[in-house]
Amino acid sequence: MTQFNFRFQKILDLKENEKGFAQIQMAEAMKQHEVGHQRNRIIQKKINEAEQFKNTKQQSGINISELRMLEDYIYQLQDESLSSKRELEHLQKKVSTSQGLLQKKAQEEKTWENLKEQKLTHFQEESKAAEQSFFDEMASTRFYRLTKANNLAEGT
């Protein structure tokens, strides 16, 4: 009996590899997105701490140059926060793009896998039919031989 050989196995293997690569890209994009979130949280924490420090200093008395330095520092942190938020938006788009690519690659792989399953099922049906035909032929030959042997035995 012959073994099943899928003609497009190399394409299926390629699609599996592409899907694996897309999974790696998506994982990396999600990791970068999480790092961006952490960076943004740290900046927000620094802003809150600086605001609290400024308020505390204002209540206890602070000279104008220190106040300006604190205000400049807070402004710089707010600017950094804005930049971080833009980066987060970019990273979110990157995650979305990689998710879309992964879905596309998974669908392509599934299509080729389904084709392989169909071909395997067809191969198995053909093999079963060929085997049945072989057994039918053997039974028919055996019946013919037995009938001929019985006729010869009766004739003598």
Image: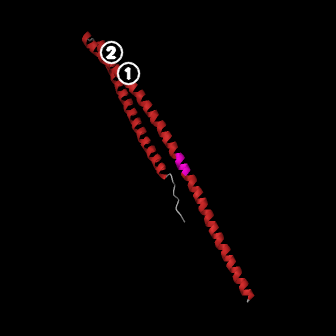
Are dots 1 and 2 in contact, CB under 8 Å? Answer: no
Q: Secondary structure at mark 2?
A: helix
Asked where in the image residue 68 lies, by quadrant, the reply is top left
Look at mark 1 in the image and give the residue it sits on.
Answer: 82
> In the image, is 138 to the left or to the right of 106?
right
How far is the residue under mark 1 from the one under mark 2?
A: 23 Å
Which quadrant holds the C terminus? Answer: bottom right
Question: Which range of residues does the magenta coloring cover?
Answer: 110-115
Q: Position of residue 21 (x, y in %)?
A: 42, 43
Q: Amino acid at mark 1?
A: Leu
> In the image, is 139 to the left or to the right of 75?
right
Whether the magenta-drawn stretch holds residue 156 is answered as no
Look at mark 2 in the image and give the residue it sits on.
Answer: 55
Asked where in the image residue 77 lies, by quadrant, the reply is top left
Compared to residue 136, the image places residue 8 above or below, namely above
Q: Which of the marked residues, 1 or 2, is nearer the chain's N terminus?
A: 2
Q: Give the label, 1 or 2, closer to the camera.
A: 1
Residue 66 visible in image: yes
**The one of 21 and 89 positioned closer to us in this rendering:** 21
